[in-house]
Amino acid sequence: MRSSRTFAVGIEILPEPLRGEITVAYLLLRVSDYLEDNQELDDARKIALLGSWRRVLSGEEERALLIERLKAAREDTPDAFVARHAGTVLDGLERLAPDAREILTRRVRESSAGMARWVGRGSVFEAEADLDDYMHEVAGRVGLLLTELFALRLSGLAGRRERMMRLGREFGLALQTVNVIRGLHEDRDRGWVYVPAEFIPDPETQPAQLFEPGRHGTAMAVLGRLVRKAEGHLDAARSYIRMIPRRHHRVRLFCMLPLFFAVRTLALSRGNPAVLDRETKMTRREVVAVTRNAKLLGFANAWMDWYCRRLAVVR
């Protein structure tokens, strides 16, 4: 589900040491993604390797055997590429300052454990709470990781940490809900449909049946429910960014870019039946324009709110 990828947008904008720390966090989570998501392994093997990865991260298990196993990854995907270089990623983790290394190790281990739990549980989402639980493990915990690093490195966040932790989790859920919408067709092909049964107005329709030609009305109703859910989480994401002092402009930009891309992608997906057949995404021209505008004008919270409203309109 591309669980950790959206927060990689704009890493190069960040100041050091956050840039290096978040780069390592991103790569560690890509290894976890590979172990959860790849098509080479059966579920039992995925669970076992995610457990081994957790123990390697904490130093409870020697890394050599797992690294050799990951070097044999055959998939031609970005996740598999990172997994094949897991040894280099672990070397990068060891070079970080102890306080940052502790945060990354703890949070990536937690996320990997959650992924293993859901691999064992399978793609059954009866209620919205089930989907939120899954998304918390693969994306909400990323929001917690980032917030801990921000609290460690940025001035002016004293007294804000508790609320930012809650909003950071929501930020992660926002981006992941948009990923769910973008990936509906692709995830269906691998046997996972991230749609809670309670979102389906027709009790006779199962999630996997939403893509059948005769279920168009039901599928569009479900899409509308997912879009509204994403919009609610994105409101929390904007509140999160407002809590970062404007003097930390590069960190705010790092957070704004995936927010803006999510808002625009959601606008393109709203009421669009093509979402069920192919990925809906921004054009390269739109990405460049959004990035340029954010860099020039993203200091003001009022502008951020106005720009989100503008991006949410499809002309």
Image (cartoon, rainbow, N blue to C red):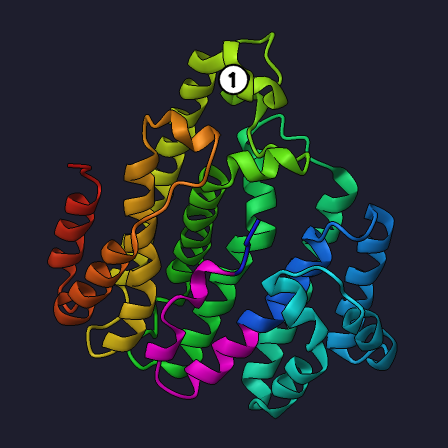
- Report the front residue among 253 and 192: 192
- Please tell me whether residue 23 belongs to the stretch shown in magenta: yes
Quarter in which the C terminus is drawn: top left
Q: Quadrant of residue 53?
A: bottom right
Instruction: Report the residue at 41% width, 75% height from top.
Output: 151
- 249 vs 202, left or right, is left
User: Does residue 107 appear in this view?
Assistant: no
Residue 139 image point, x, y percent: 53, 54
Work out whether 246 lies above or below 44: below
Q: Quadrant of residue 291?
A: bottom left
Q: Which residue is mark 1?
A: 200
- Please tell me whether residue 149 belongs to the stretch shown in magenta: no
Residue 47 image point, x, y percent: 81, 54
Instruction: Report the residue at 80% width, 69% height from top.
Output: 72
- Report the front residue among 140 and 29: 29
Q: Secondary structure at mark 1?
A: loop
User: Does residue 282 appear in this view?
Assistant: yes
Instruction: Report the residue at 46% width, 76% height from top.
Output: 149
The magenta stretch is 5-25
- 182 vs 245, left or right, is right
Prevailing SS of the magenta stretch: helix
- Report the front residue among 299 and 276: 276
Work out whether 84 lies above or below 200: below
Instruction: Report the residue at 45% width, 14% height from top.
Output: 216
